Amino acid sequence: MYNKGTIIPGLILFVLILTSPIWFNGLKAGDLPKPEPTVGVGKQCVLPVQEMRDTHMQLLNQWRDEVLRDDDRSTVVVNGKKYQKGLQMTCMQCHTNKEKFCDTCHEYASVKPYCWDCHLTPKQAASKKETH
Amino acid sequence: MDNQRRKFLKIAGISALAGIGAPALAKLTSSSAFAAAQEGHKAASGAAHGAADPSSIQYGMVIDMRKFIEKPEMLDRAIAACGKVHNIPEFPPEKKKSEIKWIWKTPFENAFTDQSQAHLSKAVELAQFPVLCNHCAEPACVKVCPTKATFKMKSNGIVAMDYHRCIGCRFCMAGCPYGARSFNWEDPRPYVKTYNPDFPTRMRGVVEKCNFCGERLALGLKPACVEACEGSGAMVFGDLNDEKSEVRQVLEKEFTIQRNASAGTKPSVFYIV
């Protein structure tokens, strides 16, 4: 092999730089997020906790399509309590703090859902309340 | 050898000709295929231009201008009610190009551009007409939308918007013969006065318009503008396909006009002038 002296150290250096984030974080993925659900109104979610963790994004998309595209605004009944299908209208009634609930995990996983481009967080909705 | 090749080429040529020509010949000579094609065309055009499916609901509205001319402030109330319910931004006059309109005021000559009557009555000439999305039975905006972000709701005939899908191409704005669609040139939130916590805002880069208060109808309420004129009969809302509905009763009694009916979109908003 020609130029063995430069190629092999160069390759080693390249691999080291490529994997540097792993070495810098000491093989840890950072502290796990601790979302605060702030349950108030219904005490029980529309699905079991684990299922909500895994598939809440699918459920939100399904609700969105049913309500918006099929005009199917039938309610979801949990423990005898009726819920409308809606993020801003329903989810955020119990989970009243988007910053401490949604954002903790989304920031950890570097997920940027576009929900809040249009939908109002409870904080935003309260910021311009009707006054009279 | 040579003889064989000559034979082969002849046969190949003839079969090629027959292969290309036979289907075309069969098509041209078969009369049943011709008739079927014509019938198919007839059926398709019938569905496109015929009467809308009378078994489904088509929400519509009758606007009685006599009432609005009598009480012009009622229209301001209706517009304000709509804005409040749907988090519609109010831009200052210097930002008129960013204006978002769901229901708004316009004079007769702008509302009814195809009606060029001379010598209008003074009352009509000076009146401000409420105009909004006509929720057409044959909406042009729906036909041009490349993402199906705007569509005709099957269950109630409302021309609905799915803002999640809108890419802001503004084809629908070009397609709409009523100028009933507005584009969000900038983030509308700083210009929304009070938030209705049960309704989202829109974001920069989507087209929006009147939704006939689909979210209120689902709760058994009337559209916000109709509710604001409650009791006056200035705005009557209901199913145009139901002969017993209040709108149909009014339509049977009164002579009404539609905006730009010649565009062929079958608008669902009628005016008593």
Image (spheres, coloured by chain):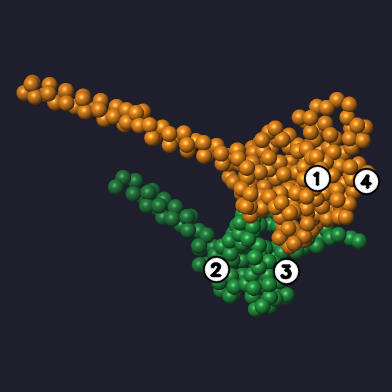
Chain colours: A green, B orange
Q: Which mark is residue A54?
A: 2
The residue at which mark 3 appears reads as: A93
Where is residue B269 drawn, in percent x and y?
A: 75, 43
Q: CA distance from mark 2 to mark 3?
A: 21 Å
Residue at image point 68% right, 70% down: A83
Q: Are marks 3 and 4 in contact (CB under 8 Å)?
A: no
- Which numbered marker is on residue B71? 4
Do discs 2 and 3 share a chain? yes
Q: Are marks 1 and 4 in contact (CB under 8 Å)?
A: no
Q: Is residue A116 above or below residue B121?
A: below
Q: Chain of mark 3?
A: A
Residue B65 visible within the image: yes
Q: Nearer the viewer, mark 3 or mark 1?
A: 1
Determine the residue positioned at 63% across, 42% down. Answer: B51
Q: Are marks 3 and 1 on the same chain?
A: no
Which residue is drawn at the image coordinates 14% and 26% (left, top)? B8
Q: Where does label 1 land, which residue?
A: B253
